[in-house]
Every structure is written in C-alpha cells, then in structure tokens.
Image: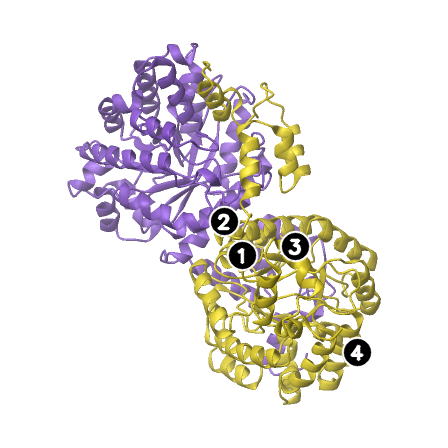
Chain colours: A purple, B yellow
C-alpha cells in the first residue's frame, strides 16, 4: 500500500477498498465517501491489523451508527461472557464495539475480540493502563500511557478514546466554574487525578504528536474524549464542556495535518432544548469532524430507564448532526448490563439512529417504514414480523394474546380500523 | 353554583375551587389558571358528577400530563383486571385514564372507574355505542350516538373524544389524496364507515350544537378526535390530516362560544423533523387549544418497542407545545397490554413529559434532576433510590450485582469517576 491512512489515501485521490465497501453498504458514490474522508467529515475506523473487519463509515450523509460497550473488569472478569456479549452485539447489528476492559486478562480478551469482530473495535487505553500496570496511578508515566496506545494499535484496535482535551487550561476553567457533578467521564477523571497528583500536564496532550505518529502508522482513528461531558442536566453546556470542545477542535486540526482520522466525543446528560445547539457547536468548533455522543440523557431521574432517556436525546442529537451513538442500557448508573439489558440498549439505540436517519433524509432510510406500513395495511402479520426491528419480540407478543378475529389483534379486535377501512373502501359493509 | 363550566366561570372572572387546586398543584398563580381557561389555552376536565376528582389542568405553562388507556373489550372482558390496571395507573401517577371499553359490561365498568379514580376519566362514546347497542353500525342513528354521549356525561366522564372533524369535506379530501394506511383511528374509521354506509353527514358534526349543549350542562371537556391522524410516517402532515385540523379549529371556536372546554387530539406516526412544525400548526389552526398527542411514533418498524418510539416523539412534541401525552406501551400494534406493559408505557411517557417540561422551562421541573444529581455526586444510594422515577427497579438492578466497592457500582467499580473526583478534589490520592 502506498498510503498510511484512509485520510492520506483520500487526500491523494485514492479510493480505497474500504471506501468502496462503505459506499456499497451506504448506497452512495465512492467519490462522496473519499471526499468526506479527505475533508475529515467522515471516518472509516480500520486498523491495518484488524483482519476480518467489515469497514464502516461514520459521518455526514451516512447512516447513523451505534456502538456497544463491554469488557472485562474487576467485578465481571468472565472473558467468555463478554465474548458472548460481543456476539450478541454483532447479531443485533451494532456497528462498533468498544472494549472497556480495565482489569484481568485484558490482552487476551482484546485479541480474541478483534479476531472475531467484523465490527470496528474501539478501546480507551487509559482504562487498560490503570488496570494492567500493576502500579498506583500516580506512579505511572507518560511513557506508560503511550506504550498502551502503541500496544492496542499493534493489536488492531480501530479507534481509541484519547482524553487529550482535559489539559491544564481546561482544568483551570473547570476549577473556576464549579459543577454539580464535576467530571463523570471515567477516563477523564483518571487523567485529571493523574495531573493533580503529579502536577504535570495531561500526557496525551503533551505528547500528542507522538500519539499521532502511532495512530498514523496503524491507521487508528482518534476519538477525542470529552472529560468534561456533563454528568447532570445542570452541568450541560457549561464553561468546562465548551472550553474542552475548543481544545478538541484544535487537536482535530493537528491530527488532520498528519492525516490521522478523528471523531469527537460528546454529552452526556443534557436538557432536550440544548441538544441541537450542542450539535452545531461541535460541528463549528471541531470543523465538521464526526460527532460521537453518549446519550444525551434528557433527564437525570430515571435510573433503570436510561436506554429511554438516551434514545430520546440520541434521536434528537443524530437528527441535528451527531453521527455515532453510544448505546446506553437500563443498567446505566446502577450496575454492569446483562445480556438482556444489552439487547434493550441496542434496540433503543437503533430506534434513535433510524428515527434520526429518516429526519435527516438519509437516502433510503424510510423505505423500511413504508414497507412495514404497507404490511400493516394489508394485515400481513408474517411480513410485519419479518420486517420488525425485533421479529422475535413482535411474534411473541402477538402469540401471547390471540384475538377472536385472526386478521386483527386484541388491541382493537373487531373494531380494528385497518380491517374496517379495508372493507369499507373495498365496497363492503363492516 | 352560578356557572355551568370552568370556562364560563373563568370568563366571568370567577376562580373556581378546581382552578385553585390546579394552581396549588402546579405552583402557579390561580389568576394565571383562570385566564388560561378563559382563553381556552388550558382545560380542567372536571365533570360535575365526578365526585372524588382531583382536578388537573392541561395546557400552556402547566406540567405536561399523561393519559393511560384501558377498558373492557371482547378479547379482554375481565372488569376486575381492568380496574387493577386503573389502580396501577393511579399509583404510577397517570394524570388521566381513558376508558376505551367497547364490549360487555361497559356501564358497570365506567361507573366503578369514575367512582374510584381521582384522575380525570375520558371515554370515546362511539366505542361504547358500537359495543353496547346490539345493532349493526349502519343501523344506528345520530340519536343513538348522542344518547351515549349524554349517558357518559351523566355518569361523570370528564372528557370525551368526539370525532367531529371527519365530515364530508374531510372525507372528500381523504379520497382525493390517497394514503398508505388510510384511517387508523378506531373511532374515526367507524364514523367514516357509518357515513359511507348511510350516505349521511358525520352525526357528531351535524349535531355539534346539541352535543355542545350536553357537554356544557355537565362540563364535559371535548377532546376533538383526529380521525386522520397518520398511521405511518408516509401519511404524516398530509392533506387529510391538515384538512381535518382546520375543521377542528372551526369547531373549537364553536365550542368556546358555548363555554365548552376543548382540547385537540393529534398524531400518530410522524418523522421526527415534522413534529415541531405540527405543534405549531395545531396551535395556530386551533387557536392555542391544548394539544393531546398519541406518540408521535417516530418510526413504523419497531413493534414491541413503541413505548420508546413514542417517548422520543412525545418528548419532542411536548417540548414544542403539546400539553398532554397518551401513553403507548410495548404491546402497541400487537395486542392488549398486560400490567407489565402498562408500567413500561407509563414510565416512558412520564420520562417524555418530564424531559419536555425541563426543555420548555416549566417552573421547578428541573429541581428533581438537580436533587438526583446531587445524590449521585454524594454516592448517596438511598437518596438516589428514593428520588428515582421507579425506586423499585433502580434498587433491584443495583442489588442484583454487588460491587467490590460498596460506594460505587459494578459499572465502573474502583474506576468510578465520581469516587475518584471526590477523593482528588478533597485533596486525597485515589
């Protein structure tokens, strides 16, 4: 290959096999994909060492993608269970999987995950660094952190969350503008703690050029983490969050100078009316780099239902410009998700993404809905099931409650409006 | 009493006990409630015969309310089960209950429901007419329909869905503008079928003045039904829907002339980007009458998850002006909901309503979130549970998965950002 990264190729006018694959998947022109990658408006996370990857594009004009989190930790160190979660995520059409492993056999798990996953794999190297290095955080060095990044890059990780924006300047802004919930980003809090304990600048910020060189060599897409993502409605769109976003915009340009692909991570907890303005802010301050959001969760009060609070925020965010949604499960704020929680979270995220794709006019997105509605009008239950987001659940629900009239359902029975209209418009009485 | 309806009282400058109650509940000025009711921007559904009613205001500047549907039907004729659903709805803080009974002991059920419900009770008289009168629909007369309205009014029903907007003019518009899913409103399809089979004008439209007189006498709030609410994304914001809305706006003025309170019913299935424009249309064409929406469901493809598709649409609708959300359960499009489905639906609707109240700046709405987030920052689990939308589910989730560190949860364990920040900002190491 005569190029290091997808972005380098794109800028040199080369349409890579990955761009072709994305174009085919999205039913758009390959040249559109190339120009989007060249200008940084889209990324194709595709580490050169990730064999078996099915390339996926994230960015403007492309279908909104969803990510699933999993990984081994102190409280859940069963590699096989986490791999089962990965298989479920792929079966349920997750576009990417983030391995948030932070304890135990993180190396083995990561290797096996990359080997089995056709979906892009992301990591947060600082989690692994803290879990893997058998030292206190304050004794770790910038070299330790970069070493983990390099290791993940060699293993074939397609994108990595790097909390480079919480530098001294952002930290000072945070201290001057007190927040209700401080820093709720796990990686962000670790970087902040390290800075506090060592008195040094954020290692990912200070050594950003070295980090870019590692990412360039392996074509790792940098996902610039938002340490100051709001952890409560109160903290949304505050000085710390926006200060960090400004820094992320500057880092984006530096990455692009090296042909390293970039996306930006975003909120968080956020009132519904602040979501669209935040999408604009990201696109402006970060020069149209793809936006990867967690939530946004539109209320703080619903633990147990945060797949719903985030589906509301995610749909609105993606309709207003976000490109990539991180799933949130009903277990958020309470515990690690089970397989059942994962499924709920994936379905909610897919609904949000699809609703947004219809709203932002992604070509062909609404065809699915039209097909479903045609099946509904025809009372063609088998076709409704086959088109359903979750055919198994739809089939099970109907089976549990059999109507007297087999062509309707127990919701309306003989008063079924579809049935009545079909008869009357067909010239019959009811 | 020297007034027939809340609206008459309001217009005569009288602050009724119901207005006082609403003002107390909403923490707004009673004069604000009075002027809102006088101008039709808010309603207080409060039938003079509904003893034990806790009055509830619906309209601009007031908290977004939610409604729960239930009732006896051919496929579910167990009165006791439906009353259990009503008790659950009240326990879970539903603001109103619609009795959609259409078969069997509808009279007994309605009487018992009104007797036990402090929440406003609504009905759709045409369902009961079809189920109750032992005749074919086509043999029924306008007098039969009005008779049922009168009966419900005497029984103490607080608001009634009346499909008066699907008149000959709207029906002609519907025929000229073909739809993918025709008419999916159950009541609307029955009225349309009756018109087709008898060749006559919509009886609720033709006899609207008589109907108003019944409603005025008992202070029944009319909920003007939207027969042409879209049943698919494709049909949203089409000629039939908007034509009917224009007619509903005219009927609203006629009702107001008789001091009858009115709200307007709305979509339905609708792409996310069409929701805000539709809220504007309703407020303009219906002169700021409160808007009562079903959903909107932002995609057609997710049977089994329509509590989520409608929470997304409902949140956005209420943030953009809708005042009253009808809950949708996971069973929508598939079967009658169980108690468990109901709970899911109520929680989703309450999340949507609350998220919207924060967005539209309802005074005090965000206090709940701030309290929860303060408890989160303090890792005060008991307070988090007590503040949670669903304390039982939150408690159960956490209990199912015990962390090694009792102050965090298994999601992050020792890497808990809240814990880390509390330590570092408190001057300790991690």
Find the distance from the CA under tag 3 to the CA under tag 1. 26 Å
Residue A171 position, x and y percent, is 34, 26
Find the distance from the CA under tag 4 to the CA under tag 1. 35 Å
The reply to whether callout 2 and callout 4 are in contact (CB within 8 Å) is no
User: Which residue was labeled with disc 2?
Assistant: A312
Nearest-to-viewer mark from 4 and 3: 3
Left or right: residue B322 compared with residue B189: left
Nearest-to-viewer mark from 3 and 2: 3
Residue B403 position, x and y percent, is 59, 22
Q: Residue B226's image quarter?
A: bottom right
Tag count: 4
The answer to which of marks 4 and 1 sits earlier in the sequence is 4
Nearest-to-viewer mark from 4 and 1: 1
Q: Please determine if labels 4 and 1 lie on a single subunit.
A: yes
Q: Is mark 3 on a helix, strand or loop?
A: helix
User: Which residue was labeled with disc 3?
Assistant: B24
User: Which residue was labeled with disc 4?
Assistant: B133
Find the distance from the CA under tag 2 to the CA under tag 4. 43 Å
Q: Residues within 10 Å of mark 2 (few under 14, many from 20)?
A: many
Residue A107 visible (yes or no): yes
- Eyeballing the image, is A21 above or below B83? above
Left or right: residue B256 compared with residue A414: left
- Callout 3: chain: B
Residue A218 position, x and y percent, is 27, 27
User: Which residue was labeled with disc 1?
Assistant: B314
């Amino acid at each position: 290959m005569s190029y290091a990264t997808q972005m380098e190729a794109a800028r040199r006018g080369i349409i890579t096999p990955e761009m072709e694959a994305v174009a085919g998947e999205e039913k758009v022109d390959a040249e559109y994909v190339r120009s989007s990658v060249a200008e940084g408006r889209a990324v194709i996370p595709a580490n050169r060492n990730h064999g078996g990857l099915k390339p996926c594009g994230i960015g403007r004009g492309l279908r909104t993608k969803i990510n699933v989190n999993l990984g081994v930790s102190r409280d859940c160190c069963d590699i096989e269970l986490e791999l089962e979660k990965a298989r479920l995520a792929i079966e349920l059409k997750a576009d990417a999987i983030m391995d948030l492993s932070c304890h135990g056999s993180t190396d083995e798990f990561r290797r096996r995950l990359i080997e089995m996953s056709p979906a892009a794999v992301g990591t947060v190297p600082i989690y692994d660094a803290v879990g893997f290095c058998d030292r206190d955080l304050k004794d770790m060095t910038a070299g330790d952190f970069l070493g983990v990044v390099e290791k993940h890059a060699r293993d074939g990780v397609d994108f990595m969350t790097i909390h480079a924006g919480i530098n001294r300047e952002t930290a000072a802004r945070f201290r001057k503008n007190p927040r209700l919930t401080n820093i709720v980003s796990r990686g962000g809090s670790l970087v902040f703690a390290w800075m506090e304990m060592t008195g040094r600048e954020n290692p990912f910020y200070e050594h950003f050029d070295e980090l870019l060189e590692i990412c360039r060599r392996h074509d790792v897409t940098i996902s610039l983490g938002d340490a100051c993502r709001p952890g409560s409605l109160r903290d949304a769109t505050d000085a710390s969050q926006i200060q960090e976003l400004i820094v992320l915009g500057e880092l984006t340009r530096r990455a692009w100078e090296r042909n390293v692909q970039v996306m930006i991570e975003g909120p968080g907890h956020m009132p519904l009316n602040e979501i669209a303005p935040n999408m604009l802010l990201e696109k402006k301050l970060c020069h149209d780099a793809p936006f990867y959001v967690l939530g946004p969760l539109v209320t703080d009060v619903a633990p147990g239902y945060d797949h719903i609070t985030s589906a509301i925020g995610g749909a609105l965010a993606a309709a207003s410009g976000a490109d990539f949604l991180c799933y949130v499960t009903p277990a958020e704020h309470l515990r690690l998700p089970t397989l059942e929680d994962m499924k709920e979270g994936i379905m909610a995220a897919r609904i949000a993404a699809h609703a947004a794709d219809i709203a932002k006019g992604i070509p062909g997105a609404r065809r699915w809905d039209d097909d479903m509605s045609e099946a509904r009008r025809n009372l063609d239950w088998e076709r409704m099931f086959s088109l359903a987001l979750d055919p198994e659940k739809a089939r099970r629900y109907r089976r549990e409650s059999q109507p007297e009239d087999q062509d309707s359902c127990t919701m309306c029975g003989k008063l079924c409006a579809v049935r009545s209209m079909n008869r009357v418009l067909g010239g019959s009485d009811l």
